[in-house]
Amino acid sequence: MQILVLHGPNLNLLGQRETSIYGTLTLAEIDRLLQEDGKNLGVAVTCRQSNHEGELIDHIHSSVGKYAGIVINAGAYTHTSIALRDAIAGVNLPTVEVHLSNIHKREEFRHHSCIAPVCIGQICGFGADSYRLGLQALVNYLRRAAGLPLQ
Ligand code: DQA
């Protein structure tokens, strides 16, 4: 089983960007943790990052037939992008929304997620653990849907 982890804009700056909010782990370190978790969960994890809305949409489109599900941190596009929401709805792949920070505890404009209604669920506020919990939840969801025992 293959899982796509998609990181949106500015997440390439993790480790140096607003560390009091986002922590000190770099994106490469988070990706390494997820790949390690993937091995323990029996899935292959591929991680991609883009600062461009259209490129994120292209990644989502080309997931069909390749990935069983998606973990996405859409960054600020979470709050603005109907196109990203339509892409997730369009491919109909189980998708989990994650955020490092607790978006509901921050500025008002971060409280709304355009993609939440087309995702299985949302995990936020746990730093890199949001991704790790998101991956675990997605794999459990997919295994349950396939009638397989949980890891
Ligand atoms: C974020 C939260 C967003 O509001 C913000 O624009 C980001 C990161 C998070 O992971 O906490 O870029 O998605």
Image (spheres, rainbow, N blue to C red):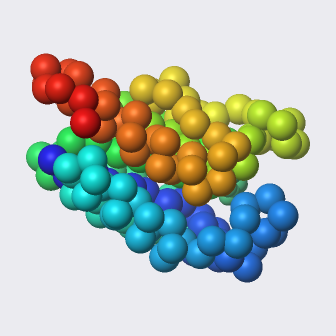
Residue for point 84% across, 64% down: 20
Residue for point 23% across, 22% down: 144
Reply above or below: 143 against 18.
Answer: above
Which percent across, then down, holds residue 5?
A: 39, 56
Q: Is residue 109 left or right of residue 2?
A: right
Reply above or below: 93 against 149.
Answer: below
Residue 131 appears anywhere in the view: yes
How many numbered discs sit on the rendered protein? 0
Which percent across, then down, holds residue 100?
A: 65, 52
Residue for point 66% across, 46% down: 126
Which percent across, then down, holds residue 129?
A: 57, 50
| Quadrant, the C terminus | top left
Q: Is residue 107 left or right of residue 145?
A: right
Residue 86 appears anywhere in the view: no
User: Residue 125 falls in which quadrant of the image?
Assistant: top right
Residue for point 51% across, 73% down: 29
Q: Nearer the viewer, residue 77 or 45?
A: 45
Which percent across, then down, holds residue 143?
A: 21, 30
Reply above or below: 145 against 56.
Answer: above
